[in-house]
Amino acid sequence: MRSILVVNPKGGCGKTTIATNLAGYYAQKNIPVSLVDLDQQRSSYQWAKSRPASAGEIDIRTEIADDYSTKRVIYDCPAQIHLGLTTDLINKSDVIIMPINPSIIDHRAAFKFIFDIRGLIRADLCKKIKIGLVANRTNAKFKSYTEVEKFASMMQTPVVASLRNSQNYVGAAEAGLSIFEMPGQKMRPDREQWRSLNYWAEGKLLKKTVGA
Ligand SMILES: Nc1ncnc2c1ncn2[C@@H]1O[C@H](COP(=O)(O)OP(=O)(O)OP(=O)(O)O)[C@@H](O)[C@H]1O
Ligand SMILES: [Mg+2]
């Protein structure tokens, strides 16, 4: 079993979008997957419950379990997550995906969070875990993207994917599906951007990890 923690205390940065699409990715590959919605808003839960009967099965939960019968577990965390829960989840996870919007306000919040996690690791309160940043709703051509890269380099944390602002995510969410399960070629550019993110979730870092 492999567990993936999607976390960032900043609200609206793309945690649920990434957690649900990753769950859909595994479901369409017939890899048994649990999606744990830890946010009281229950957006992941509602998405999972709205999936069409033809879509691959996702074991949807609203609480952390001691054991799962699936091969992948994805934690969709709430905004303003406290360090106690963060510690607990890091100790249960194999890798972190941290979506980040390209704005100085978001970078400052992310700085504090990564700093706090490193403090927990140094104090031996949680295990050493790799954090992969996902530059969300941006494009390598934007000036703001350079700022994400600068931030990543300062934090010595890789940008493992860059996702453009795309209505495909909105359409897929409305259909109870992921971009990997939607029909047609329209999703292709977004799926392509996910390649390095899917690798990261599996514990692999693609050489070319930045750029849209
Ligand atoms: N790459 C994207 N392209 C277009 N829309 C996006 C993208 N990423 C996220 N969104 C939209 O932005 C909004 C916030 O995203 P999401 O709910 O995934 O963030 P979140 O971090 O889970 O928020 P919260 O902290 O409230 O749980 C949603 O309406 C979502 O559809
Ligand atoms: Mg959310």
Image (spheres, helix red, strand yellow):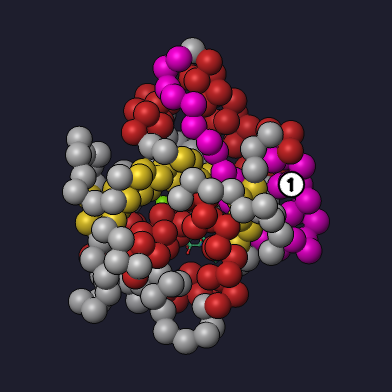
Q: In the displayed structure, would residue 45 be above or below residue 107? A: below
* Residue 129 part of the magenta-drawn span: yes
Q: Is residue 138 left or right of residue 32?
A: right
Quadrant that contains the N terminus:
top left
Q: State the extent of the magenta-drawn residues as a range.
A: 124-152
Q: Where does the image place residue 77, in percent across and percent down from the top left?
A: 39, 43
Position of residue 39 in the picture relative to residue 98 (left or right): left
- Answer whether residue 145 is magenta in the image: yes
Q: Nearer the viewer, residue 26 or 47?
A: 26
**Residue 31 horizontal side relative to residue 187, left or right:** left
- Residue 150: give x, y in percent of width and height: 77, 42
Q: Is residue 187 above or below residue 80?
A: below
Residue corresponding to mark 1? 149
Q: Residues within 10 Å of mark 1 (few under 14, many from 20)?
A: many
Looking at the image, which residue is at 42% across and 84% down? Answer: 183
Q: Secondary structure at mark 1?
A: helix
Q: Quadrant of residue 85?
A: top left
Q: Is residue 101 visible?
A: no
Q: Three-letter amino acid code at disc 1?
A: Glu
